[in-house]
Amino acid sequence: MKLPEILIPYRPSDPKVGAPCWFTMPPRITMLRQGGCLLRDDVVWRCRKGWYWRAIRGLPFDGMSYPWPQRSWLPDRYDPLTLREGALHDCDFALNDYFPEWHEIVKLFDINVNLLDGLKMSRPDLAHAFYITVKLCGYPVWAHKSREKLMLQWLEFVGKPEQLDEWIKGVVKDQAV
């Protein structure tokens, strides 16, 4: 399988450096019976280096990924205020699982900086707590290579908008809570 170009961060010819920014509203999600959720809207982010990063609708993910002990004092993993950060971070981590070349295209450091910068905009009150919690558990997840059926299907359709929309409808019909 080839890495879909739509998921590769890109740098415009005249990047706006030093001004991270979300270009999308918090996305809609659909909760899935087997756990996690499905991203229903695209997420677009400009990082502090001026690059654009995307998580495309249909992405299966688990909201903000932090371990169960922290779930008692941090907000809901599916808090609408942090869904963009969770989706983008999970997308970038998942691409490392499926494409060996991903770590040559992007660096874990940049993925984590994107998370922190986004959280500073969406949840400045808890940005560092979220970031530290996710980062503490992040490397074992980065190093682990998973092969999830739903993710493989999404990767097959992500660069084909019409087919992707049909696949999403099917997943929602068959697996939504």
Image: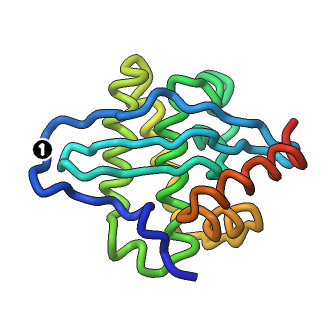
**Left/right of residue 68 with respect to residue 66 in the rendered view:** right
The kind of secondary structure element at disc 1 is loop
Residue 87 % position (x, y): 54, 44
Residue ranking furthest to the front:
162
Pick the quarter of the image with the C terminus.
top right
**Left/right of residue 19 with respect to residue 9 in the rendered view:** left
Colouring method of the image: rainbow
**Left/right of residue 35 with respect to residue 37 in the rendered view:** right
**Vertical placement of 126 versus 15: above or below?**
above
**Tally of numbered tags:** 1
Residue 9 picture quarter: bottom left
Residue 122 % position (x, y): 41, 24
157 and 84: which is toward the camera: 157
Residue type indicated by callout 1: Val
Q: Residues within 10 Å of mark 1 (few under 14, many from 20)?
A: few
Residue 80 picture quarter: top right
Residue 134 visible somewhere in the drawing: yes
112 and 57: which is toward the camera: 57
Pick the quarter of the image with the N terminus.
bottom right
Residue 101 % position (x, y): 42, 80
Residue at 36% over, 51% down: 53
Residue 113 % position (x, y): 31, 46
**Vertical placement of 151 versus 24: above or below?**
below
- Identify the residue under disc 1: 17
Residue at 12% over, 57% down: 13
Residue at 64% over, 30% down: 78
Residue at 44% over, 61% down: 7
**Vertical placement of 103 versus 10: above or below?**
below
Residue 140 visible somewhere in the drawing: no
**Vertical placement of 122 versus 172: above or below?**
above
